[in-house]
Amino acid sequence: MERNRGESRICEWFATVLVAAVFSYLLLEVKAHDGQAMTAEEKSKIRDQILEMFDHAYNSYMTNAYPADELMPLSCRGRVRGLEPNRGDVDDSLGKFSLTLIDTLDTLVQLLNKLEEFESGVKKILSDVRLDNDIVVSVFETNIRVLGGLLGAHVMADVLKQRGERMQWYRDELLYMAKELGYRLLPAFNTTSGLPYPRINLRYGIVNPLSRTGTESDTCTACAGTLILEFAALSRLSGERIFEEQARKAMDVLWEKRQKGSDLVGTVINIHNGDWVRRAGFLVSVTCFGEVENLRFAFTAVPQQLRIKAQLASDNRENSSIYNILFLMTDSGVGAGIDSYYEYLMKAYILLGDKVYLERFNTHYSAIMKYISQPPLLLNVHMHNPTVNVRSWMDSLLAFFPGLQVLRGDLKPAIETHEMLYQVTKQHNFLPEAFTTEFRVHWGQHPLRPEFAESTYFLYKATGDPYYLKVGQSIVEKLNAHARVPCGFAAVQDVRTGTHEDRMDSFFLAEMFKYLYLLFSEKSQLPIDIDDYIFTTEAHLLPVSLSTSQPPCQTNNTDPQALEDDLFSYSCPSAQTLFPNNPTFAKTIRDGYKYLTGVGRAQQASPVRGIELPLHDTGLEPVEFLKSMGISLTPLTELISASQGSASQDSHKGFFKLKLVAEVTQSPEHEEVVPLIVQLISPPFLGQTVLTAGPAKFGLDLTKQEHGVKGRIVKSSPYTACGSIENPVALQGHIALALRGDCMFAVKARRLQEAGAIGVIFIDHREGSSSAETPLFQMVGDGEPTDDISIPLVFLFSKEGAMLTNALQEQNNVDVLLLPKEKQLGKEKPEKLNIKFRLANDGDLAEGEMESTTIQLVLEPTESPTEMNTGTQETCSFPQDEPESGP
């Protein structure tokens, strides 16, 4: 069905506008789930509250942090990259370009009508910000936050200038800055495939020896697929097509590389050859008794579904062999690593008027609803075998997806997933970074992400249901109650404890307050017509009029898909279809999920349990044993029946009928962790500074070392130890310090051991973490054998790590001792006294003691705990009442 670009302006994404217009009047009189519709006065009061919160956060940044990239709200100072402890990938968004101001600038006009602050902010950017810094940044983050921020601010400046209100001096300076940044990002696309490098040096690019980047081989799907809106807008505003062409090519590659059988994409892709990177996995140990050659793995029948690594190890038992099988899979979902790729397909159609993007989105969306959507859950699946769930938890970034479903007009699953997310926030105050299918915390951090507020806004605009105003009000209240601090708003380090993290990301100002303010505003109360714009993934507004500025790319075609078009594939949804004469439609869907997490009612088990593995056996005992552990099993014959026929089924019947025992060890939920310490023993510390550390499951076992391991500490270069070690001479014979992040612990350990280090102290990259507030854990390997790692490894949380690095900075030479906490040097060990009780018979009593049953308290020294010196024992006799007679 053809659509011209003019129609795209009418029908682009307004499930929101159309439905809200039809039902706003009806729902004003309908009692919502939590009470009556909000009055205009109530909404105005909440709007004022949101404005006050924005002012508190924005003024805290401008007063205490600008021109730094971000505010550290607990320290009340700016975060300058290189001056603060490295946090790993999180810091890749910081480029010494006043990130928070650029990211927030258009919000000042678009919604808040703070024209004086906007004009002042633009002048600051033009006078203070440089884009040629010698710093490595994320291409993805720089695009959505900085390039998008500059473009959004340029659009607003142009609007104000045309109105004659302000900015009469403006001569497209922000657009020129955006174009400069675009050209600085372009070298990232110089790959064989056309997929961009994940990082780039703003001054030196990729290939320059001074760039300190360009060695990466992988990028995430969202990283490569979330460029088209900003790059195309830059092309159409500047007249230079190269930006849109490069971003479009990356989108074409991702589309071509989708798994043709499932129409899904993976999370990580190789930028040079376009192969999907298999990372998700699990380990199964199988012990075979008898002749090894009799063993056959049924997995070989489905080679495209799994990649298997098997390693043979000897066992003490006679005639037995152990196979450790590591399954590496390509996972697919709608959360972290993929999320905004799907979003930008839909929105590229809206912004650019090119139906190819809509056709691709519809193809992917059908696959998502078939495999990933398990209402109200959205679960990652195996890309090549999408009926298999690869994990039993979800990440918080998927909270954007109900909003995207609203744009498509598919409201029922949007309402279901959003309600599930709301119930999780009611249980934990905020969405944890990851939570299980039974709604327990998987990762407790909450960096004030805006995706849930975004979906709440879109659902309210689509339904007009005042229930979503109540949801928005709860977000406002929880931010003030649990995240507000004297100097802005602080991220939550763990939703279970409510502890804060010294972090306020730029997206909090750029997105959170924008969606919340819009939620409680009418169109007439906004300084611009919101319907003339589309949101980027960072909530910057780009004008949909760009769809008519140039025709679609003629070579950008999508292969015809044999898909059954639904009502929403090519047209705006009708109100009658969405709400069939029932303005309480949304409430009837929500009611089935209001006790989903157990809040308000006894918790019920989730219907989703375990992970389905393509592991096959015809023997009943191992099958039932694994099922009892929550692992669903499928017979091999069922798995291959569709492709190989009945003859093949017969040939595999009884395939595993041999003397085989599947040994699957289930780790306890709360595994006991033996605490270690890092004790500073050189002057001036002399053993008085002791830092609690966590152990590793591999490397030298410090609990078996009589005196621990002593050495001088030296910081690794690079600090993450994920690249070639640059200071092996300095590390030789010393204990290395390395930052957590970017690669696995085992990879770091091997590199540092090869460089000559005699031990490694890993330091957490999550700022503010400490052993006092976070439970210790054991570092694990990377799935490969770790027997080659023979040096001791310990882990310090960031607060303890900061004490160690500060000591090194002040003293230059610091000697430490790595050992179990119980063997702490200089710690006085209390004398132990064994106390034994025994009942003495009446005949054993000394002369003069009462004739009754007595309890004797025997005290003896620990040197001979198994001997009793009857000549020195002390006896305490306690008279006892005569027992009553009984049957």
Image (tube, rainbow, N blue to C red):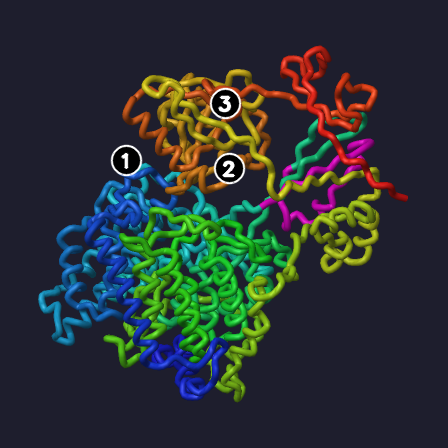
Residue, far front: 848
Q: Earlier in the sequence, mark 3 or mark 2?
A: 2
In magenta segment, residue 298: yes
Q: Which residues are magenta?
A: 281-309
In magenta segment, residue 158: no
Nearest to the observer: residue 737 or residue 366: 737
Judging by the rendered image, the residue that carries numbered circle 3 is 819
* Figure quadrant of residue 455: bottom left
Q: x, y (%) of residue 354?
A: 39, 71
10 Å neighbourhood of mark 1: few (<14), some, or many (≥20)?
few
The image's mark for residue 776 is 2
In the image, taking residue 62 as reference, residue 652 lies left or right, namely right
Under mark 2, the amino acid is: Leu
Under mark 3, the amino acid is: Leu
Tell me the SS state at disc 1.
loop
Judging by the rendered image, the residue that carries numbered circle 1 is 210
Tell me the SS state at disc 3.
strand
Q: Is residue 556 visible?
A: no
Q: x, y (%) of residue 229?
A: 34, 63
Q: CA distance from mark 1 to mark 3?
A: 40 Å
